[in-house]
Image (cartoon, rainbow, N blue to C red):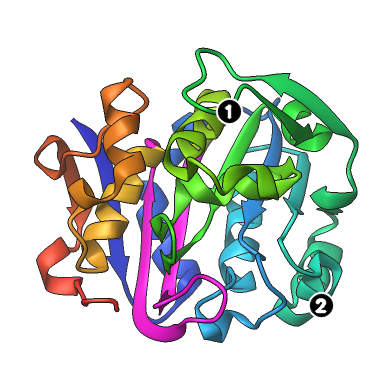
Amino acid sequence: MTSVAIVKGKTPSKMLETALKLIEAKNLISPKDRVLIKPNYVAAKHPSTGITTDSRVIESIIEFVKRCGVRDIIVGEGGSGDTEKAFDIVGIRDVVTYHEVRLVNLNRDTRINVKVPQPLALKEVGIAETALESTCIINVPTLKVHHIALVTICMKNLMGLILPKSIMHSQINQKIVDLASIFKDKIKINVVDALVGAESDETSGNPVEMNLIIAGQDMVAVDAVGTAVMGIDPFTVKYLRIAEEIGLGVSNLEEIKVLGENIEEVKKRFR
């Protein structure tokens, strides 16, 4: 069974350390990897809103990756709004400066057109060169409801790697799966910053205090667990069903081993 860890607490660094130990994350990274840490900075809003990834989580991931012997580390994101302003508001510039890693605005990166293998709806997409050159992506989304796709966690967070983003909005469920299929071998670890989630909307929703970190290797399984933690049945999320049908990952909760906290004990019903 694929494993997903849920850790509850008040100290992000300790929570992350516990979650990564539970999923044996150190076995998923090589010192030779070129690591891209991909947060969610979709809008220029503070992490306390639940909209963007907390920089304390990113900092703890940088420290973990360094302990694994990796020296080539980039934090990269291409938000839908002003990504440079988002970098300022979330406080990530100080983190990357202190740890001497690169910060890349993927919206300003060189774009490479990539054909989707066996596409459902997205035949070709422009992807940031930094993402394509990485050998290991650590996906660090937040826990949010989405006004079209119902939820946005790991799989949908990959939209920050592409340009233009507007191509995703028709047949969004199929295209989320297509995009995830491109990166399925590069994404080694998914860490959901669920310290504060967002209900109602992904860019202007209301914050929901959760005090959780959710982590796993299978992004479909992590999304399924995150969806359930928001009080939403994963079966109602169309892109999760499609992803499982084509073998991209596991969305059936009965086939996922949840480590740490029990879903029912930490679940809150998001609007």
Residue at the image position 24 percent from the left and 39 percent from the top = 251
Q: Amino acid at mark 1?
A: Leu
Label 1, residues with CA under 10 Å away: few <14, some 14-19, many ≥20: many
When the figure is inspected, residue 158 is found, relative to residue 59, above or below; the finding is above
**Residue 88 numbered tag:** 2
The answer to if 191 sits in the magenta stretch is yes
Say whether disc 2 or disc 1 marks the residue closer to the N-terminus: 2
Provide the secondary structure element on which disc 1 rests: loop
Residue 196 lies left or right of residue 45; in this view the side is left
When the figure is inspected, residue 71 is found, relative to residue 152, above or below; the finding is above
User: Which quadrant of the structure image shows residue 195?
Assistant: bottom left
Q: Which residue is mark 1?
A: 122
Provide the secondary structure element on which disc 2 rests: helix
Residues in magenta?
189-218
| Label 2, label 1: how far apart the Cα atoms are | 33 Å
Residue 127 lies left or right of residue 254; in this view the side is right
